[in-house]
Image (tube, rainbow, N blue to C red):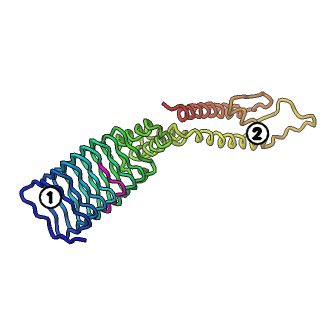
Amino acid sequence: MIELYGLEKELNIVESKITIWDSVFKEAVDFSNTEFREDVEFIRTSFLSRNDFLGANFARDAHFWVANFTGDANFNSANFARGAYFGNASFTGNASFDFANFASYAYFEDASFTGNASFDFANFAGDAYFWDANFTGDATFTPTKFDKVSFTGATFTNVSLEETDYNQMNVEWSTLKDALVFNGPAYIKLIKNFREREQFEEADAAYYQYRQLSQKNKKWSPSKLMGVVAWLSCGYGIKPEYPLIWGFILIIIFALVYKQGKGIKRLQLKENGDSRVSFWDAFYFSVTTFTTVGYGDWYPIDRYRIVVMIEGVFGWLLLALFIVTLANVMIRP
């Protein structure tokens, strides 16, 4: 292991290849606005203090595999003309890649960001890989531009995708569910991305959370009330089991009303003349009323005609809602 206290450079141009492996920079390192014309290798190198690559230009591959950045790492406005390799790198301090330009592949797989990680206004023209990266602090990609980016297996504590632009994002909803900062357009774009990738269940889960958070931020109004109804009745159109559950509950409630109030009679009495209404009789009548089948072997009496009308309306609405919601879930675009 080599211990270094600084790396002096003349002017801001480095013509030769830099190869530094298994070394330690004990003092601050400043490569601001430096032009690296050949490959740069800081592999398994530790930066124990602040390091600045502000505005640095990497004309060829930049290798920071398994590098350890103990102090703040500043790559703001850096330009990576070819591959940028930060696989298994560890950022203990804050890592800033604001306005950085990645013209080719960018690898951050298994990278660990203990402090805040900022990629604001960064541009990834090539594929960006954040496989299994761990973001313990805040992660911001606002408004970062990607072509294709993968966060497969990544973990976030708090991540912002406000105004983030991408053609394709590989990510599981479980990765973002509890960490994504709420922003309406960011959610809508993410839902669209899931659908385009045929991750329909993840799209539904993201849409459900989007509607919940959107409702939470609204003041009480007719619009919010309708949102509550949409949530309770059908889970915002993506949970067909909701109207079935409500339907079963209503059938039981109306059955109890018919039984306790003796509100129904059999069209033809039993041979023994027994006119009593059992719970199962009331339940049977409630089901036929709710489903608007109405076999006619039982009929309501007196004011219970109104009760039957009310149950029939509820039944018609909930069954229609079930069919529409089921179709919405099963028939994908």
The amino acid at mark 2 is Ala
Residue under numbered circle 1 = 31
The amino acid at mark 1 is Phe
Residue 120 at x, y percent in the picture: 25, 49
The residue furthest left is 11
| In magenta stretch: residue 110 | yes
What is the tally of numbered marks visible in this picture? 2
| In magenta stretch: residue 84 | no
Q: Quadrant of residue 12?
A: bottom left
Q: Is residue 218 visible?
A: no
Q: Tell which circle, 2 or 1, labels the residue nearer the N-terminal end.
A: 1
Query: Residue at point 40% right, 39% down?
Result: 193
Q: Quadrant of residue 308?
A: top right
Q: Which residues are magenta?
A: 106-114
The numbered mark at residue 282 is 2
In what quadrant of the picture does the N terminus appear?
Answer: bottom left
The answer to whether 107 is drawn above or below residue 323 in the figure is below
